[in-house]
Amino acid sequence: MAALIECEDVWKIYRVGDVEVQALRGLSLTIEQGEFVAIMGSSGSGKSTLMNILGCLDQPTKGRYRLNGIEAGNLKPDQLAGIRNQQIGFVFQSFNLIPRTSALENAQLPLFYRGLPLKEQRAQAAAALGRVGLQGREHHYPTQLSGGQQQRVAIARALVTSPSLLLADEPTGNLDTQSSQEIMKILETLNRDEGITIILVTHEVDVAAYATREIVIKDGQVLSDRVTKARPTAIPVGV
Amino acid sequence: MSAFVWLTILTALRILARNRMRAGLTMLGIVIGVAAVIAMVSIGEGAKRAVQAQIATMGTNVIVIFPGVTSASGVRGSQGSAMTLTVSDALDLKKRIPLLADTGWAKRDVMQIIYGNRNWNGPINGISPSYLTIRDWSFTSGGPFTQTDLESAARVALIGQTIVGNLFEPGEEPVGAVIRIKNVPFHVIGVLAPKGQSAQGADQDDVIFIPFSTAERKVFGTSFIGSVGAMFGSTDQVEDLPMAAEQIREVLRSRHRIQAEQEDDFTIRTQVDIGKVQEGTSETLTMMLFAIASVSLLVGGIGIMNILLVSVTERTREIGVRMAVGAKRRHIVMQFLIEAMTLSLVGGLLGIVLGIAGAKLTTLIAGWPTIISGNVILLAFFFSLVVGLFFGLYPANKAARLNPIEALRYE
């Protein structure tokens, strides 16, 4: 069985004026279906760049990145958009909900771009909001929701397409401790009960502790990679 | 796709509703442009129709032939001053040109008319009976005089509405009354139906018709018997007018023995020629209005483009989110195009309403006739759509070309 994520000698080089910045320097990484990975590292370590590449928002300058067996390095922008829509859910530090748009419509957004019939979009978005415990808040606007609730809407938006990969970029960075715990519990549950692969970027050790594997990035390379917990769902060997 | 388009339109409307002031100001250019087009074209069409109606009062398919000008030692007289056209010219034209349905002739002079203790100075026209049919004169009471009246130089008169108004008491029946023209008594045998102003603005109802022969012998005291002030011809079909005019010219030149190098001693005008001058004027006006309207639509379009560029910048993060969750370029382009078109269409609709109201108000206040044509409304609608599309393209493309990573990070 192919791994969900395969990075092989991935380089990302930016040019800022005359200066060449090597954000990723031959990074290799494999992540299996169903893992809950925490990526840590100081700012400037390249973890944001890595997240962008994993999320198909960006492409490596050199090296290969395969997601679910698809070579993402050579795809055109619209094909990448298609992959993001089909395979990836994003949760951002600053929630990034569309302002003055109801929770339901926010959660609906990825389905909107799939061109599903309106009724189906609404039903699935309402179900996703239910999964993050926001029943009855469908018609609230982001400003009427607390930070934690907003982030839950964002998770619902990420979940609504049943993605194979959920990318969470410091999802608790803007939240208080209690909300942070709620959000992390939701992510943990999604990973444990539904087998959704989650990659989480965080600075905080207690947030990273929810993950089952911890990868530390430094200077664009993997510094350490260790399994911190037993995998929640047993993956049968040899399948 | 249809769910996408529908939702995008709803979203666009919601954004507009949220920024009503901004949307209103943005649309103002389009509103004014479209309203100007509708109002102006309606007024223009009304004016054109009025002119056409005036030209139609000339009669149906009329050709007018004036005599040339006199020339004494190089000093030229006014048009029609020469006595070159005669009754026999008119009779011969009818005989020799089959295209002509009829010919008529007339001669006029302004004279004092007296009835009871009132008097009026009005144009007396000595005419052939055929003139009445060529010029489409009808009667409110009484009727025309006949060929017999012409031959016997009968003292009968047909009077126009202005004459009736000036000589008779309201409600008094003119038919049967005796009026005096230059002290010659005439029986009024017919009252002419009103025609209103001519295309040149003259009062066509200030008129008295008497038989040509009577005018010549008993009223005007003409020195050249048989010379006419103007000749008239008519054809059955409008299309025949130019051909008939050309044939009249040939016949008259040969009758007047005009050499090849000499100029005509007469002038021929067809109803079509006269109409063209008027239509030319209104076309110039229409072109000018279109120029003004295009400028204001252009300005309106630039306004829309400007506000959309602002909107793209303001909503950079939103665009980033949309891209992250899988919006393709065409989705983003469509979203902004639909917003632009919603703006321009709503503006266009408001403009149409305002334009129609403006046209109606013009009719109400100034009394100008206006005609609101469905075509203009469709055209205005179409133009506002095109303006939205055209000026929305640049901002829409700008939005679609954003890098999702930078857009997501935008503060």
Image: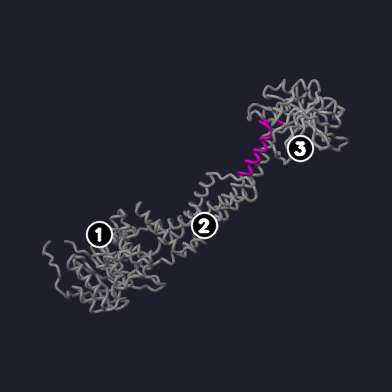
Left or right of B14 on screen, residue B157: right
Residue type of the residue flagged with mark 1: Ile
Nearest the camera: A104 or B96?
A: A104
- In percent of the image, x 11 and y 64: which residue is there? A236
Nearest to viewer (mark 2 / mark 3): 3
Q: Return the residue at label 3.
A: B169
Nearest the camera: A178 or B384?
A: A178
Quadrant where the N terminus of chain A sits is: bottom left
Residue A79, x across and y down, in percent: 31, 58
Element assignment for label 3: loop
> Residue B137: in sight, yes or no?
no
The answer to whether the residues at label 3 and label 1 have Cβ atoms under 8 Å apart is no
- In percent of the image, x 32 and y 73: which residue is there? A146
> Over which residues does the magenta segment extend?
B45-63
Q: Is residue B48 magenta?
A: yes
Where residue A70 is drawn, which disc sits there? 1
Q: Which chain does tag 3 point to?
A: B
Q: Which chain does tag 1 point to?
A: A
Q: Return the residue at label 2.
A: B301
Q: How many marks?
A: 3
Badge 1: residue crowd in 10 Å (few <14, some 14–19, many ≥20): some
Residue B407, x across and y down, in percent: 38, 67
Q: Is residue A50 magenta?
A: no
Residue type of the residue flagged with mark 2: Gly
Residue B3, x across and y down, in percent: 34, 53
Q: Main secondary structure of the magenta part?
A: helix
